[in-house]
Image: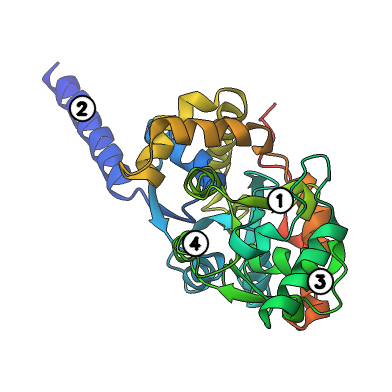
Amino acid sequence: MMRRFFSVLLGALLLMAAEFGSAQAAETIRIGYIPVLGSSALFVLDGKGWAKEAGLDVELVRFTSGPQAIQALTSGRIDGYVAGVLPLLQARAHGVDVKVVAAASIEELSVVARGKLASELPKDATNAVTPATIKAALERFAAEQGHPARIAAQPPGSVPDTLLRYWLKKQLGFADPAKAASIVGVGIDAAQQAFLAGAVDAVVLREPALTVVEAKVPDLRVLATGHDMMPDQPGSVLALVKPDAADHQAWARTLTALFVRATTLLAQHPDEAVPYVQTALGGGMLDDAVLKKALERSAASFISDPSRIVAGVTALQDFEVELGLLRKAEPVSDLFNQTLWRPTP
């Protein structure tokens, strides 16, 4: 009897030791992100505690631009990334086995103007602001001011920078984007502050910055929405390093499923996400009503299917090669894993 008791006790102790060892060995999954609304699914799954409930130890690491996050990715300091998609092609070109496993949002970026440049646009609401009228306004501004309009975006190689140049050339018809505008590449917060201070004439913005700036700049005019710049414009994505590797498969599938769950909540019930996005982005500085408005305006842009952005990524990469920003195009299809985001049968 005593022998059986000690046998059972020993088995229980061994099981507890194994579970303790497993918990001790649990790997921290470091996910880099850009502090914009397109990263909201990450904030939701973290804030709601879904990752912990699923047994994942997820650490969020903040960056101010995609290229900055890519440096961390290529050096092995982060295991995943929620930000713009284009820099990931450069990471793959440097030998990093990183894959987009889910989209997060599309058509995030808009271009807005103020001051003299805004005044060059038609004032009558019945006169639509078209690519032709915007091009004419930029040309008049340059002629009258003696220099091109200054437009703030993020650093070269980032999605905002490439998309701005794409819009100037492909949508507005300028032969040389560098001559159409003086593009200022700075961090996200610096771009917003430069615009608010009047240090630049226009800026590429994402939510919630767009809603915040609209309330502070009475003469603000929208030059282009995300759809105007490029239909199904590639936005933020969830990308993971080696998602198909044996030691990554389990957590990669779980994390992707949680990310898709959070994206669905954002699309269907954006008001529920306010406290989690507020914690990540607001830091107590953003009004809940402003953030709620930004999330509701963006609800239709929260998507999970990565196939929606493949064509846009291809077009933008080809454009970067055309501009000489990339030496050669990388196979876009190799960047995507289009199976993990789908619900398990």
The quadrant of the picture occupied by the C terminus is top right
Front tag of 1 and 3: 3
Front tag of 2 and 1: 1
Of mark 2 and mark 1, the one earlier in the sequence is 2
Q: Is residue 232 above or below residue 83?
A: above
Residue 188 tag number = 4
Residue 337 tag number = 1
Quarter occupied by residue 139: bottom right
Residue linked to disc 3: 319
Residue flagged by tag 2: what amino acid is it? Answer: Ser
Front-most of 244 and 327?
Answer: 327
Of mark 1 and mark 3, the one earlier in the sequence is 3
Q: Mark 2, residues whose alpha carbon is within 10 Å: few (<14), some, or many (≥20)?
A: few
Residue flagged by tag 3: what amino acid is it? Answer: Phe
Q: CA distance from mark 4 to mark 2?
A: 62 Å
Residue 7 tag number = 2
Secondary structure under tag 2 reads helix
Q: Is residue 50 left or right of residue 5?
A: right
Front tag of 3 and 2: 3
- Do the residues bearing badges 1 and 3 touch, measured as CB atoms within 8 Å? no
Residue 73 coordinates in the image, percent (x, y): 51, 67
Front-most of 103 and 171?
Answer: 171
The quadrant of the picture occupied by the N terminus is top left
Residue flagged by tag 4: what amino acid is it? Answer: Ile
Residue pictured at 85% horizontal, 61% vertical: 171
Secondary structure under tag 4 reads helix
Q: CA distance from mark 3 to mark 2?
A: 69 Å
Residue flagged by tag 1: what amino acid is it? Answer: Asn
